Image (spheres, rainbow, N blue to C red):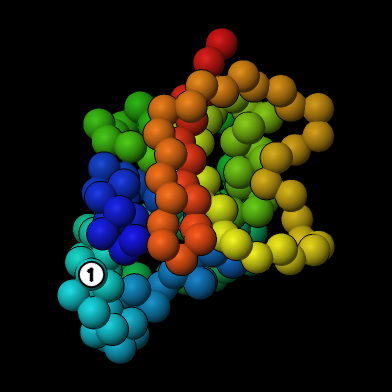
Amino acid sequence: MLDFINETERSVGTYLYGRKIYQMMIGWETDPSVAAQSPKSAEFARIWQRADKVVFSSTLQEVSTERTRIERSFDLETVGTIKASVDHDLAVSGVGLAPTAWRMDLIDEVHLFIAPILVGGGQRMFPDQVRHPLELLDERRFGNGMVFVRYTVTS
């Protein structure tokens, strides 16, 4: 499965993160034992480290990874400027950013990994009163019960 994740992440050149997801991901650069788990983990670490990271946070004071900067607000002008300045894919991650990106019509594709476990609670990924038709582009099943689905957002 990590081979598949590496393949899908290879096209991402910039990650747009909320503070919590950024802090969860920094181990791919700051903790050598994470990448040392397997050759596939090491490959993911290289992919992640090569990408730019923009952390949207009003509380984070500094970043601990290379190719990373902080922006204070996730707004259409800031994201539009980032999008216009790159020629590669952007990925949006974070419970605060994803719903906002949906409301601002910034999502072109949806990549979902569905895990075979039900956990109640938490914040929702899809905001209320937002409706976008989707067209299925790809689906994969993995031996561990995970399912990946990829949709394009249609008009």
Residue sticking out furthest to the bottom: 33
- Of 87 and 119, nearer the camera is 119
Up/down of 100 relative to 18, above or below? above
Taking the spot 38% from the left edge, 40% from the top edge, the residue there is 90
Looking at the rendered structure, the secondary structure element under dot 1 is helix
Up/down of 59 relative to 134, above or below? below
Taking the spot 31% from the left edge, 63% from the top edge, the residue there is 2
The C terminus: image quadrant:
top right
In x, y percent, where is residue 5? 33, 55
Taking the spot 56% from the left edge, 53% from the top edge, the residue there is 114
Total marks in image:
1
The N terminus: image quadrant:
bottom left
Asked whether the viewer can see residue 67, the reply is no
Q: Badge 1 local density, few (<14 within 10 Å), some, or many (20+)?
A: some
Quarter of the view holding residue 44: bottom left
Give the residue at mark 1: 40
Taking the spot 31% from the left edge, 32% from the top edge, the residue there is 85
Query: 78 left or right of 3?
Result: right
Query: 108 left or right of 59?
Result: left
In x, y percent, where is residue 37? 28, 84
Residue sticking out furthest to the front: 143
In x, y percent, where is residue 130? 74, 27
Up/down of 11 relative to 55, above or below? above
Q: Amino acid at mark 1?
A: Lys
